[in-house]
Image (spheres, rainbow, N blue to C red):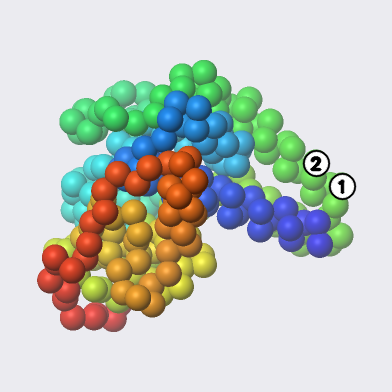
Amino acid sequence: MAILVFFVAHYYLSLFTQTFYLHRYAAHKMFTMNAFWEKFFFLFTYICQGSSFLSPRAYALLHRMHHAYSDTELDPHSPLFSSNAFSMMWKTKNIYNDVLNKRYELAERFEGDYPEWAAIENFGDKWYSRLGWGTLYVLFYVQFATAWWQFLLLPIHFLMGPIHGAIVNWGGHKYGYQNFDNHDHSKNTLALDFLAFGELFQNNHHKLPMRVNFGVKWWEFDPTYMFIWGMDKVGVVKIKRKVEATSKKPAKKMAA
C-alpha cells in the first residue's frame, strides 16, 4: 500500500507542477502571482519532479517553439517526425539540453517573461541532485516494497517529467478527436483527462493557447483549471486573460 500511495502521489504531484507551473505559468503566463508564490511553486516544482526536474526557462522556450512550429520539422517534439515515443523524447532531450545551455539559436526569439531562480535551476540540473533524488526513491522502495516487481516502477520515478511529456506530446498529437481545425495534428485524447490533468486537450489548447481552462465543451473536464480557479478566488494567483471559444469556428470531430 505504501508503494502505491507513493507512486500515485509522485505521479500526480509531478504532473501538477508541470501543467500548473511550467506550462500554464512559465510558458504562457496565463495568470500572475506575487514573488513569494512564484518562488514557492518554483521550489515545489523542484521537490515534486525531483530527479527529473525541468528548468522553467528551458521548458518555456521549448513549449513556445512547439506552438510556433507545431507538427513541422522545427517542432521540438512532434510525433510526426519520430518513429516512436522514445525517439521523439530523445530528440526533445537533446534540444532541451541545447536550449538550457543557450546553444540553440532557434530558441532565442522566445526568450523572456518566465520565472527565474538561478540557484535552484542550476542545482536541480546537476547530476548529484538527480542522483540524490533517485537514491531516495530506491531507499523508500527498499524499506516498503512487498514484492520484487514493485522495483520495476523505479525507472518511472527517475524519469517522471519526460514520461509526462511523452504521454502528452505523443498521445495528444496522434489519438483522439478534434474540436478545431488548427492546421496541425493536435487532438483531444480524453474527455475526462485524469491521466494528464487537462494536458491531453491539445487540440483545444493549440486553438486557444491563452485560455486557462483547456476544456471547451461542457463535458470536457480540466482538473488543473479548477485548482487555478480556486487559487484565483483566494488571491494566490490572478487569471490574466479569459478567452472564450465561442469566437472560434469549430471543425468537425475527427477520429484519430
Q: Amino acid at mark 1?
A: Gln
Q: Name the residue that disc number 1 marks.
A: 143
Q: Residue at x 77, y 56 (%)?
A: 3
Rendered-image quadrant of the N terminus? bottom right
- In the picture, residue 94 is in which quadrant? top left
Circle 1 crowding by C-alpha within 10 Å: few under 14, some 14–19, many from 20: few
Q: How many marks?
A: 2
Q: Name the residue that disc number 2 marks.
A: 139
Q: Amino acid at mark 2?
A: Leu
Give the x, y percent position of residue 101. 37, 24
> In the displayed structure, would residue 212 be above or below residue 124?
below
- In the picture, residue 169 is in which quadrant? bottom left
Give the x, y percent position of residue 83. 34, 60
Q: CA distance from mark 2 to mark 1?
A: 6 Å
> In the displayed structure, would residue 77 be above or below residue 32?
below
Q: Residue at x 16, y 76 (%)?
A: 251
Q: Residue at x 21, y 65 (%)?
A: 245
Q: Is residue 107 visible?
A: yes
Give the x, y percent position of residue 135. 73, 36
Is there a contact, CB below 8 Å, between mark 2 and mark 1?
Answer: yes
Give the x, y percent position of residue 21. 44, 42
Residue nearer the viewer, 78 or 223:
223
Horizontally, residue 104 falls left or right of residue 225, namely: left
Horizontally, residue 149 falls left or right of residue 191, namely: right
